[in-house]
């Protein structure tokens, strides 16, 4: 609950930031494309070293020490890992700033002239902020292992707030290229604040923390060994994301920004439900999972319960993106330079993303199960499969397929997100099959999934009836009138079909 609440607050702040950004930049502007492309490049560093790789290698070792009451040794490991991480990230940030022109040529070859030069400037500003976000992820690992979830997941609100404040203060008086540079500096300031607010809490839960290079510790060596395959795994996933960015840069202006807008909406249920369950379960599973039958039974119980919790919320989210994405996008982004036509375009990209939404969220929890078992190599193998599929299908769906179908080339952006969804399903099924062979049968019952999709389809049908019957209204009001009945019908149908979790969700809503 605390992880979900923290993620919800940070994601809502992110949606506000996206709306303010859309108001000032619109969709089809070189400055918007340049900022969104630049924003992705240093985030490679954060995603590579941050939540995924660091959590998967550090939390299982650190949380196991905490669970056994070996607090002094745990703090020693945390300090050594933090020191090594800071040294490594500092070198990479410096190298990234110096090598930015090469990165742009490799990742966004479609950018030329002033658009390319602006992207280079923005990347150089943003890189140090990404380094601070990596250190923030180290704080998250320490706090999560002590069951302190709320602060670490609400801290990104500070980062979003800094960017929103920058847009509001300078948006009306600045040209778009200058505003993009100011926004990049606002991101760096927000990154520092996000890291700084967590430090006092880290020092409270880890009073014996000392920062030092300690390669003699066996636990530190275990973290380092586990980090390498997870690092590579996260790296190949990031390579997939940047292949998408590269292909998008070859599409008409607006594709890069359209994908960025859709991804913020698409990742909301992944983070809110998939990440929250996986992050909350990883420390517990790491402390209790073992190689014997009892450990496997515990893992199966927690995994199956987590999968059902995730699916209960993600299936209606996917249906909403498919059937009602235009309503959601218009309510959140249709303001200023962002037009209704832009909302329809982002809806198409969002619908493509919905193809793999359930697989991506379930896959996070399956990966956490492997990490709890100290197995970081199996997720790596399947991540490579996913990248190969994403690359091949992404090119086919983005470039030749629109030409073959006779649709505008810009719609290749929707093909990119759909191809990533297909690859996500392949990865999740491989993860499940291999884990089942190791610990026993896991997964969602077919009847449970059918009931969820039936309830979601019924809700979408009612929502469409409302959408067709109401007169033209401001996007936010229309969304409330359309999305409200969708949610109510879905919940009522799940109660009528006796879907597990529906009654509990209703009790929580009524208590609120």
Image (spheres, rainbow, N blue to C red):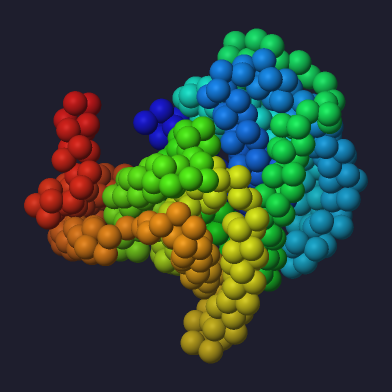
Position above or below: 292 against 63: below
Query: Residue at the spot x=55%, y=23% of the render?
Result: 68
Quick one: which residue is furthest to the front in this view?
292
Q: Is residue 180 visible?
A: no
| Left or right position of 205 against 40 | left
Query: Which quadrant holds residue 205?
Result: top right
Query: Which quadrant holds residue 54?
Result: top right
Q: Is residue 420 visible?
A: yes
How many numbered discs, if any? 0
Residue 462, image x, y percentages: 15, 59
Quadrant of the snapshot with the N terminus: top left
| Left or right position of 72 against 442 | right
Residue 260, image x, y percentages: 56, 54
| Left or right position of 60 against 96 | left
Position above or below: 89 against 98: above
Query: Residue at the spot x=71%, y=25% of the render?
Result: 77
Is residue 502 or residue 160 the one in the foreground?
502
Position above or below: 242 against 264: below
Quadrant of the snapshot with the C terminus: top left
Query: Residue at the spot x=53%, y=37% of the render?
Result: 286
Is residue 28 or residue 126 the one in the foreground?
126
Is residue 269 or residue 469 the one in the foreground?
269
Is residue 300 or residue 82 the one in the foreground?
300
Query: Residue at the spot x=48%, y=24% of the render?
Result: 147
| Left or right position of 387 against 274 | right
Residue 346, image x, y percentages: 46, 60
């Amino acid at each position: 609950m605390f992880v979900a609440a923290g993620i919800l607050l940070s994601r809502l702040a992110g949606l506000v930031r996206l709306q303010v950004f859309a108001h000032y930049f619109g969709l089809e502007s070189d400055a918007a494309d340049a900022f969104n492309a630049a924003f992705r490049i240093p985030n490679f560093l954060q995603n590579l070293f941050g939540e995924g790789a660091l959590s998967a290698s550090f939390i299982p070792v650190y949380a196991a020490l905490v669970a056994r009451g070996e607090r002094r040794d745990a703090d020693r490991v945390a300090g050594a890992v933090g020191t090594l991480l800071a040294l490594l990230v500092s070198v990479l940030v410096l190298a990234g700033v110096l090598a930015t022109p090469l990165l742009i040529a490799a990742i966004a070859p479609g950018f030329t002239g002033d658009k390319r030069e602006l992207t280079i400037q923005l990347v150089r500003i943003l890189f140090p902020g990404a380094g601070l976000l990596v250190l923030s992820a180290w704080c998250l690992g320490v706090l999560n292992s002590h069951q302190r979830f709320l602060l670490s997941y609400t801290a990104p609100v500070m980062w979003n707030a800094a960017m929103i404040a920058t847009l509001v203060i300078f948006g009306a008086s600045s040209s778009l290229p200058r505003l993009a540079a100011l926004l990049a500096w606002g991101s760096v300031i927000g990154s520092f604040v996000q890291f700084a607010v967590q430090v006092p809490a880290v020092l409270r839960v880890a009073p014996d923390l000392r920062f030092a290079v300690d390669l003699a510790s066996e636990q530190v060596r275990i973290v380092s060994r586990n980090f390498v395959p997870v690092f590579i795994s996260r790296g190949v996933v990031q390579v997939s994301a940047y292949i998408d960015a590269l292909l998008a840069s070859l599409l008409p202006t607006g594709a890069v920004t359209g994908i960025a807008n859709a991804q913020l909406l698409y990742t909301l249920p992944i983070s809110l439900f998939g990440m929250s369950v996986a992050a909350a379960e990883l420390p517990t599973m790491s402390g209790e999972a073992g190689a014997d039958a009892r450990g496997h039974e515990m893992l199966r119980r927690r995994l199956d319960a987590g999968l059902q919790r995730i699916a209960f919320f993600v299936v209606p989210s996917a249906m909403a993106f498919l059937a009602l994405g235009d309503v959601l996008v218009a309510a959140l982004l249709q303001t200023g330079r962002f037009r209704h036509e832009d909302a329809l375009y982002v809806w198409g990209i969002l619908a493509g993303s919905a193809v793999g939404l359930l697989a991506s969220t379930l896959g996070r929890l399956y990966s956490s199960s492997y990490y709890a078992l100290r197995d970081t190599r199996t997720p790596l193998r399947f991540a490579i499969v996913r990248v190969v599929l994403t690359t091949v299908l992404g090119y086919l769906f983005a470039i030749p397929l629109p030409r073959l179908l006779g649709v505008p080339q810009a719609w290749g952006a929707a093909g990119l997100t759909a191809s990533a969804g297909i690859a996500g399903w392949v990865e999740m099924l491989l993860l499940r099959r291999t884990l089942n062979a190791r610990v026993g049968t896991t997964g969602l019952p077919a009847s449970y999934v059918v009931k969820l999709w039936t309830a979601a389809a019924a809700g979408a049908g009612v929502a469409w009836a409302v959408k067709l019957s109401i007169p033209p209204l401001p996007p936010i009001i229309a969304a409330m009138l359309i999305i409200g009945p969708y949610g109510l019908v879905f919940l009522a149908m799940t109660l009528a079909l006796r879907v597990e979790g529906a009654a509990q969700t209703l009790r929580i809503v009524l208590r609120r």
